[in-house]
């Protein structure tokens, strides 16, 4: 079993800042929507301060914010940005917090638009907060479904995207999503609806559409394949793993690498087993090495020997790129294989060299 959301959230309160940062990075890169993430984040900020709680916080890609936490998010962002330079890490954390809020469901922030707009005007750090778009998304929530559907006939691409999101929150978007995926036709310019559907899937989990998303994963256009990859991670669906297992051997190099990344980031129950199955199907060394690195980042200590093998055989350069996460081996070993920690540490030290200090826990 890969390292779980619950373990990562718990480790966001770990005394070692390297463990806290790695935990936050892994859980947010999986697009987890667990409501306990924000309380864990704020608790760590209150204990160690925004400067030291999560040293890499401004670099995270996703942060789920629930409606009952919006007011606190805004209050903290205002306090953290007041009188600080844009390059100040605490100020950057404030900017990232409100930026994350701006991409939440419109229903989450609709009653806070005035406060968000005032905050945006208070500091340049909030330059990425699209207040005009946020207002349009909120306005769409109060339009009739028939009015929203008219945008699919004569609206601009932005109008279509906003209407689609509003219908999704009402549970009425499925026919349009199905039509949008059908309009992705090889070697043709996609329709505005097709583009809007893929964008929607990359911003909101829409399980049930794993098949067309996996087809788009192999697009020659990087932007399309990247959005499809994010959408599949957001779904966190066992169906995705089944489809990858069936199609991996016939994928090109780029499709295989993206598939491995999806398996790593979703951290599902069968992820490690699937990587073992895919390893001999990798078309070249880069793919097989990516599989080993993915297995390392899954931290499946239920299959400790396989994990150690992947760690020891991974390419040096690849291992250095993920060294930030290896501090998680210590708290995980304490939970899963405490008696094995001396052996695990010895084998990891043999590979890490100068980076082996990661294995010396901070009290």
Image: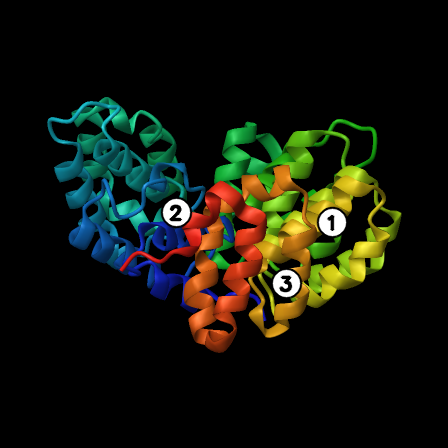
What's the distance in space between the residues labelled 3 and 2, CA to CA? 36 Å
- Spatial CA span between label 3 and label 1: 27 Å
The residue lying at 76 percent from left, 44 percent from top is 287
Q: Tell me if mark 3 has few (under 14), some (14-19) or many (20+) residues whose alpha carbon lies within 10 angstroms of its own.
A: many
Query: 298 left or right of 238?
Result: left
Q: Position of residue 9 (x, y in %)?
A: 37, 62
Q: Quadrant of the N terminus?
A: bottom right
Q: Any mark on residue 214, and which?
A: 1
In this picture the colour scheme is: rainbow
Q: Is residue 341 left or right of residue 194?
A: left
Disc 2 target residue? 104
Work out whether residue 66 can be spotted. yes
Among numbered discs 3 and 2, the one appearing first in the sequence? 2
Q: Secondary structure at mark 3?
A: helix
Q: Which image quadrant for residue 360?
A: bottom left
Image position, residue 274 (x, y; %): 73, 63
Q: In this rendering, would 34 be left or right of 145?
A: left
Q: Residue at x 26, y 24 (%)?
A: 87
């Amino acid at each position: 079993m890969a390292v779980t959301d619950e373990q990562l959230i718990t480790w966001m309160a770990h005394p070692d800042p390297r463990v806290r940062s790695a935990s936050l990075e892994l859980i947010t890169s999986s697009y987890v929507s667990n409501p306990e993430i924000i309380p864990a984040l704020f608790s760590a900020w209150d204990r160690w301060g925004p400067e030291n709680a999560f040293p890499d916080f401004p670099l995270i890609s996703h942060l789920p914010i629930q409606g009952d936490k919006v007011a606190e998010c805004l209050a903290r962002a205002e306090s953290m940005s007041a009188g600080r330079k844009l390059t100040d890490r605490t100020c950057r954390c404030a900017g990232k917090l409100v930026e994350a809020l701006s991409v939440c469901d419109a229903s989450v922030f609709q009653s806070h638009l005035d406060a968000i707009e005032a905050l945006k005007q208070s500091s340049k750090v909030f330059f990425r907060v699209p207040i005009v778009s946020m207002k349009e998304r909120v306005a769409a929530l109060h339009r009739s479904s028939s009015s929203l559907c008219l945008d699919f006939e004569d609206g601009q691409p932005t109008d279509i995207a906003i209407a689609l999101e509003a219908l999704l929150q009402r549970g009425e978007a499925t026919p349009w999503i199905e039509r949008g995926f059908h309009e992705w036709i090889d070697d043709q310019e996609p329709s505005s609806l097709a583009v809007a559907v893929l964008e929607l899937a990359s911003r909101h989990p829409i399980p049930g559409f794993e098949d067309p998303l996996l087809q788009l994963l192999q697009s020659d256009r990087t932007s399309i394949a990247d959005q499809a990859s994010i959408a599949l991670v957001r779904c966190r669906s066992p169906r995705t793993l089944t489809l990858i297992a069936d199609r991996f051997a016939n994928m090109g190099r780029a499709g295989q690498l993206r598939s491995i990344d999806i398996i790593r980031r979703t951290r599902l129950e069968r992820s490690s087993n699937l990587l073992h199955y895919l390893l001999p199907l990798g078309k070249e060394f880069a793919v097989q090495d990516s599989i080993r690195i993915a297995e390392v980042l899954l931290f499946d200590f239920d299959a400790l020997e396989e994990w150690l093998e992947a760690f020891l055989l991974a390419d040096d350069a690849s291992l250095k790129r993920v060294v930030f996460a290896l501090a998680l081996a210590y708290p995980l070993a304490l939970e899963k294989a405490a008696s094995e920690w001396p052996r695990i540490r010895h084998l990891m030290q043999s590979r890490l060299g100068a980076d082996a200090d990661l294995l010396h826990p901070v009290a």
